[in-house]
Image (cartoon, grey):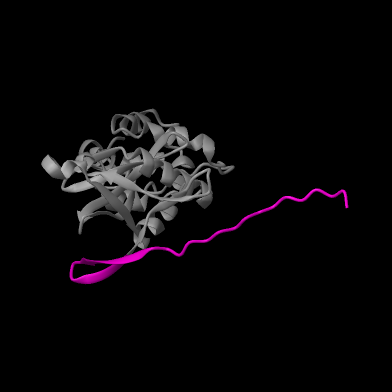
Amino acid sequence: SGLDYDRLLIDTSPPVLTYYNINNKERPAFKAGYVWEDGELYWHKIKASDVGYKGLMHKLELEIFIQAHALNRLFMRLDGINPHLINEHMNLSLLLNHIINYKGNILIQFKIFGCKAGWFVSEIIDGTLLIKSFLFLTNDGTPEGDKLKETAGLSKVGKQYFHIDTLNNFVNSDIEENTILKKLFLKAGCKSLFKLGSFIKANEKKINTADALLHYMNFE
């Protein structure tokens, strides 16, 4: 007929679901995987040596599972960014698996557009790495969030009250325009959050946060 046709092949794989006993409750979690350019499904894995295992155990590769709670927190706290992009950068972050041990938790760095935006909170359970939650960079329980609490007296309640515990609210605030506040956030390691502002559509009017935040922290 002289017409050209594109052929689209669609394949699906059912999610791999398992249950973990956490605090005497059965919690479901999904096996974390990704599809590469060849169209094949691959599973995320992490070296046991990267999470502190030594001796014979250090050569093992641990499969990664993620709770729905962690995914919900990821999309909620990175509001303002397309969920498809978040999913793509989640896979990149798990492939890079920049890991630290922090206050009894295994934290996996999450980057988007090359900027650090937060950490996955995880632990080793039943020979796998289970991601239990996602913390935005300013949240308590991250090195940056705890630094804000230590140096500026900015508690979890304060972060929630001033709505700086999610990306969209943070980049649309007037914090960057305030010299004192910007210096505090830079000192805490939150430089990347200011960079992320260029990837989010800014509101026509900034959220007035700086003055009230300075008053709260007694920096007036």
Residue 15 falls inside the magenta stretch:
yes
Please, which residue is most extreme toward the right here? 1
**Rendered position, 23 above or below 105:** below
- Where residue 54 sits, quadrant-wise, is top left
Residue 187 in percent (x, y) is at: 29, 29
Give whichever of 4, 72 is nearer the camera: 4
User: Is 24 in front, or is 82?
Assistant: 24
Secondary structure predominantly adopted by residues drawn in magenta = loop
Range of residues picked out in magenta = 1-28
Residue 74 vs residue 140, the one in the foreground: 74
Indicate the quadrant where residue 193 lies. Answer: top left
Residue 108, located in which quarter of the rendered image? top left
Going by the image, does 145 lie left or right of 54? right
* Coordinates of residue 99 in the picture (x, y in percent): 27, 40
Say above or below: 104 vs 199.
Answer: below
Residue 130 appears left or right of 53: right
Q: Is residue 14 magenta?
A: yes
For the point 18% across and 67% down, the residue is 23
Report the side of 3 relative to 10 (left or right).
Answer: right
The C terminus lies in quadrant: top left
